[in-house]
């Protein structure tokens, strides 16, 4: 298993750079790496006890493989494979596939890291690869959005690196376990870096512009897996330390409400999906012990939604309400919207039920409000007009990606089939019905343009400083 893990971790780097020697095989190599990750994730899911790999010496690289890792790796594998299939006929360059496979490998590395230095290196590589993919079109707009992302990411990782140094100063170890005796300022600095990297709460408000302005397949990668590289370590910390668990749960509830609060009023499809990514990451953090399953369902559905949004005739929901979309595309959009709203027969239902069952009493009201907001948000998609006519043909790669992602939402029901009881079914259906009614009676007619000043670059950096002070207070408390 140790040798298999090392081969699997290093494979994307070798094949990523090797694709330059075989430029015509870039998409095949990237798809092959994703399938290798799929196989490895299944091995992780069936690990009965966590497997720890200690490389170099006692202060070296530490890896941990368990079912939590397996869920996140599986998400990365399926989303990457779907993006490759989507781009199959789009003549993407070897540079695109090289960065995609390096991004895939770096995200996988995060999901098995168990020490702060390895985590830092992996997150930095993710930042560079994501920047290059965001800026791939080489337009002035894409380059600025990419640089903005890179600046925010690097600033966040400076906070993280300072926190890691303080942890080592206290315990002479970079292992996650060293956080047990870490000073409060170290915990706060680490959290600021990871909350920002993961697009959590106000320090993560860089996310909507970045995800909405990127190319469609890049948006799918960013929302489906990249942001989860920031929340995976937080979920791991919460499971390891009782004192950290309430902090992670608090930010989970706050993030779920903040993101959905923006999403219900947003009229731009890609910005709505991006804000809803912020909200759904809160669901992952609100119940860390089952966050892996929720991360899987969210990754599948949000990637599908971004790919679908890229094939709609307009990003403006007001325009879409008067311009019917192809019925086949609407069906895919409805299935994904049903899943994220928690409709039975799709894995979003089981993930929401499992999450709600693992909430603490003080979280219940907030997370139920977030679930209601989700139903309101996606009613915008479900009630769009449809037509049997195709004004422009959808490429075969789109349907291959949809088959993989939406099929995964159906198949993933086996993870928590116990959710299908009468009591569990009634509550989500009632929430969805109430959300749809609220949309038709109230939100369909309301036009509120929320200010974007908080998304400006200088305010994003300032928000990190304010978040650091807030975290100091939380850790002290």
Image (cartoon, grey):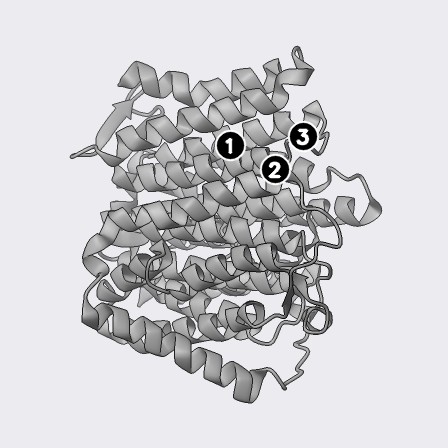
Residue occupied by mark 1: 104
Would residue 252 be found to the left or right of residue 326 on screen?
left
Residue occupied by mark 3: 96
Q: Quick one: label 2, few (<14), some, or many (20+) residues within 10 Å?
A: some
Instruction: Give the number of the mark in front: 3 or 2.
Output: 2
On the question of residue 106 being in view, the answer is: yes
* Residue situated in front as seen by the camera: 271 or 106: 271
Of label 3 and label 2, which has the lower sequence position? 3
CB contact under 8 Å: marks 1 and 2: no
Residue 335, x across and y down, in percent: 47, 58
Residue 422, x across and y down, in percent: 20, 70
Of label 1 and label 2, which has the lower sequence position? 1
Disc 1 to disc 2, C-alpha distance: 20 Å
Kindly identify the residue that appears in the image at 68 percent across and 42 percent down.
134
Taking 19 as reference, is 80 above or below it? below
Query: Element under label 1?
Result: helix
Instruction: Give the number of the mark in front: 1 or 2.
Output: 2
Kindly identify the residue that appears in the image at 51 percent across and 62 percent down.
334
Q: Quick one: label 1, few (<14), some, or many (20+) residues within 10 Å?
A: many
Residue occupied by mark 2: 397
Query: Element under label 3?
Result: helix
* Residue situated in front as seen by the camera: 284 or 170: 284
């Amino acid at each position: 298993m140790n040798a298999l893990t090392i081969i699997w971790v290093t494979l994307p780097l070798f094949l990523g750079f090797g694709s330059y020697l075989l430029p015509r095989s870039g998409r095949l190599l990237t798809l092959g790496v994703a399938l290798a990750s799929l196989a490895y994730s299944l091995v992780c899911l069936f690990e009965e006890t966590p497997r720890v790999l200690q490389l170099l010496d006692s202060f070296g690289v530490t890896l941990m493989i368990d079912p939590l890792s397996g869920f996140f790796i599986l998400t990365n594998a399926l989303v990457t494979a779907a993006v490759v299939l989507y781009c199959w006929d789009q003549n993407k360059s070897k540079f695109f596939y090289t960065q995609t496979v390096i991004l895939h490998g770096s995200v996988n590395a995060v999901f098995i890291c168990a020490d702060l230095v390895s985590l830092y290196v992996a997150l930095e590589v993710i930042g560079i690869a994501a920047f290059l993919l965001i800026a791939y079109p080489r337009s002035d707009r894409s380059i600025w959005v990419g640089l903005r992302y890179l600046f925010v990411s690097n600033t966040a990782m400076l906070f993280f690196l300072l926190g890691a140094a303080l942890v080592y100063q206290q315990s002479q170890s970079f292992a996650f376990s060293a956080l047990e005796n870490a000073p409060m300022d170290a915990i706060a600095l680490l959290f600021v870096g990871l909350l920002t990297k993961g697009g959590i709460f106000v320090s993560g408000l860089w996310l909507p512009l970045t995800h909405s302005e990127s190319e469609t397949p890049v948006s799918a990668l960013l929302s489906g897996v990249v942001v989860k590289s920031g929340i995976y370590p937080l979920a791991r910390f919460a499971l390891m330390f009782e004192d950290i668990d309430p902090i992670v749960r608090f930010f989970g509830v706050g993030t779920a409400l903040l993101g959905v609060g923006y999403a219900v009023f947003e009229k731009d499809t890609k910005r709505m999906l991006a804000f809803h990514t912020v909200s759904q990451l809160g669901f992952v953090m609100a119940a860390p012990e089952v966050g892996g399953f929720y991360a899987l369902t969210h990754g599948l559905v949000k990637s599908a939604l971004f790919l679908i949004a890229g094939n709609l005739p307009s990003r403006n929901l007001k325009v879409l309400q008067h311009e019917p979309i192809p019925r086949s595309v609407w069906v895919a959009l409805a299935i994904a919207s049903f899943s994220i709203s928690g409709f039975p027969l799709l894995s979003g239902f089981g993930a929401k039920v499992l999450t709600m069952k693992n909430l603490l009493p003080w979280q219940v009201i907030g997370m139920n409000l977030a679930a209601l907001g989700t139903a309101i948000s996606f009613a915008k998609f479900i009630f769009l007009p449809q037509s049997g006519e195709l004004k422009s043909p959808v490429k075969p790669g789109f349907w291959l990606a949809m088959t993989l992602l939406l099929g995964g939402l159906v198949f993933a029901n086996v993870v928590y089939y116990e959710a299908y009881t009468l009591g569990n079914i009634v509550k989500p259906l009632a929430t969805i019905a109430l959300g749809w009614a609220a949309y038709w009676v109230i939100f369909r007619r309301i036009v509120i343009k929320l200010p974007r000043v908080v998304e400006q670059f200088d305010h994003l950096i300032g928000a990190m400083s304010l978040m650091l002070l807030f975290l100091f207070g939380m850790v002290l408390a």
